Image (tube, rainbow, N blue to C red):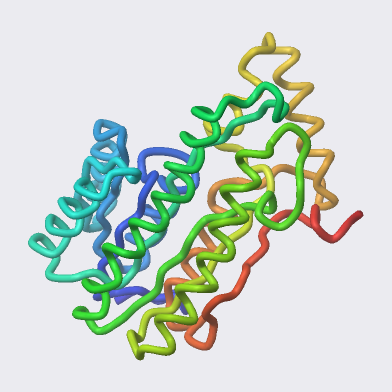
Amino acid sequence: MTDSVYDVSGKVALVTGGASGIGEETARLLASNGAAVAVADINYEGAAANAAVIEAAGGQAIAISLDVASEASWDAALATVSERFGGLHILVNCAGIEFVAKISDTSLADFQKVMSVNVDGVFLGMKTALPVMRYSGGGSIINISSIAGLRGFLRQSAYVASKGAVRLMTKAVATEAAHYGYNVRVNSVHPAAIDTPMVRSMVARHDEEGRQVALGKMADHHPIGRMGQPIDIANAILFLASEASSFMTGSEVVVDGGVTATC
């Protein structure tokens, strides 16, 4: 047991996108608060490195190779988690990709790739995990959407469409799980710009000075005065994973430094 008010001791968690960014931080935070964690990512080496960090800190973790857009890959991942840990109580659908371009410069293949990871991945995760979670006695699913799932953004038609889909799919599955007595809560988290490798890749075309200027502009866009850090989102995920949020399902938790509070 931990002394955290958000204790998740005795729970089993699977975190997609667990090799870097928000997923990496979330896996570590859940483990430090008592959960056994399956760190899942298409980048198996990165997932294994994070699992090793968790174990070195005294936590319990395994790494899983997972292509979230593949149903067969999800089936294999859940079989591994069930075999190793005996069930599943927490699913964090964190894996995602970004795409920035005018709609006239977005090919159908570009659009479908974003949707396959950001939407198909969440759909398959919930579809595959729900039976295991029911068998395990219930739990919590946390889907990472974005403030781009709440409002439009310039040159991000594909990304906005995908994150809006995650937002409403979360509500639909939350309602279904409650209606049929699955004892599984389903909520979404909506970050603004978070200082992760994915966000930094968006400014990678600039030289070092240009990257710092671009990142500074991102920070200034947040009324709170800074970009978010992965731990800011991981803390919200831990709350939703724990019994502290036991009366929440179908909710949108916005963690955006005040961006959506402004026009």
Image location of residue 196, percent across then percent down: 55, 36
Q: What's the residue at 49%, 43% (across, down)? A: 115
Q: Relative to the observer, which residue lies in front, 248 or 59?
A: 248
Compared to residue 45, the image places residue 82 above or below, namely below
Compared to residue 53, the image places residue 103 above or below, namely above
Question: Can you tell which quarter of the image residue 88 is in?
Answer: bottom left
Question: Can you tell which quarter of the image residue 202 is in?
Answer: top right
Q: What's the residue at 52%, 70% (across, down)? A: 187
Q: What's the residue at 47%, 79% (across, down)? A: 5
Q: Residue furthest left?
A: 83
Q: What's the residue at 18%, 55% (across, down)? A: 75
Q: Does residue 188 appear to the left or right of 80 in the view shown?
A: right
Compared to residue 188, the image places residue 217 above or below, namely above
Query: How many numbered marks does the figure carry?
Result: 0
Q: Does residue 253 appear to the left or right of 240 in the view shown?
A: right
Q: Quadrant of the C terminus?
A: bottom right
Question: Can you tell which quarter of the image residue 179 is in?
Answer: bottom left
Q: Does residue 129 appear to the left or right of 147 in the view shown?
A: left
Q: Does residue 195 appear to the left or right of 76 in the view shown?
A: right
Image location of residue 184, percent across then percent down: 37, 80
Q: Residue furthest top?
A: 207
Q: Relative to the observer, which residue lies in front, 200 or 184?
A: 184
Image location of residue 125, percent across then percent down: 34, 58
Q: Quadrant of the N terminus?
A: bottom left
Image location of residue 16, percent across then percent down: 36, 49
